[in-house]
Amino acid sequence: MHNLKKNMLGSYNAGDVDKLLSKVRIDYEKCLKEQKERILKLRDENKVMAEIVEQYKSNERLLIGAMTRAEATAQSIIGSAEKRRRKGSRAWKTRKSRSGWRSRRGASGFTSSNAPARRYTGQSPKPQATMTIRRFPQAAYARW
């Protein structure tokens, strides 16, 4: 690493010591400069990462809000469907008990023998005319 040689008196040559110290100083300054550059680079990366984290936090807040609203909407829909089911169930029981419901045609106007066949097409049903909607019982539309 170093070529310091002692002279006859046991001391080092001043010129050799100066050369060694000069080499050490240059190496130290080079290392220091590299470390400063690395620190600056890491600071820049840190700023970018902080911005990304803020974006994620913002997105998280938006998603939490959307999920909360969706949850509330779902609960509202479930509640109103439950309410309609209870109301419809009472009306159906009343209708059954009043007038021998088995002998008459259903709410759709069809008996099981002349009811139109329904095919599954894999697509959402298209809105139909008001007159057609009245022909089918309300329960048939509860799942749409």
Image: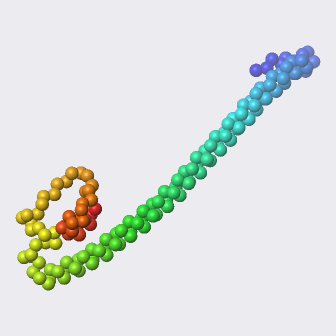
- Quadrant showing the C terminus: bottom left
Residue drawn at the location 71% of the way across and 38% of the way down: 40
Judge whether 40 appears above or below 99 on screen: above
Displayed quadrant of residue 26:
top right
Q: Position of residue 3 (x, y in %)?
A: 81, 17
- Quadrant showing the N terminus: top right
Judge whether 12 appears above or below 51 on screen: above
Residue drawn at the location 81% of the way across and 22% of the way down: 23
Any part of residue 45 in sight? yes
Q: Nearer the viewer, residue 41 or 16?
A: 41
Q: Position of residue 48 (x, y in %)?
A: 62, 43
Q: Position of residue 78 (x, y in %)?
A: 34, 69
In the displayed structure image, the side of residue 4 where residue 81 appears, left or right: left
Residue drawn at the location 38% of the way across and 70% of the way down: 76
Q: Nearer the viewer, residue 81 or 5?
A: 81
In the displayed structure image, the side of residue 113 where residue 2 appears, left or right: right
Residue drawn at the location 13% of the way across and 70% of the way down: 109
Displayed quadrant of residue 116:
bottom left
Q: Nearer the viewer, residue 32 or 95?
A: 95
Any part of residue 10 in sight? no
Judge whether 3 appears above or below 68 on screen: above
Give the color scheme: rainbow, by chain, secondary structure or one colour: rainbow
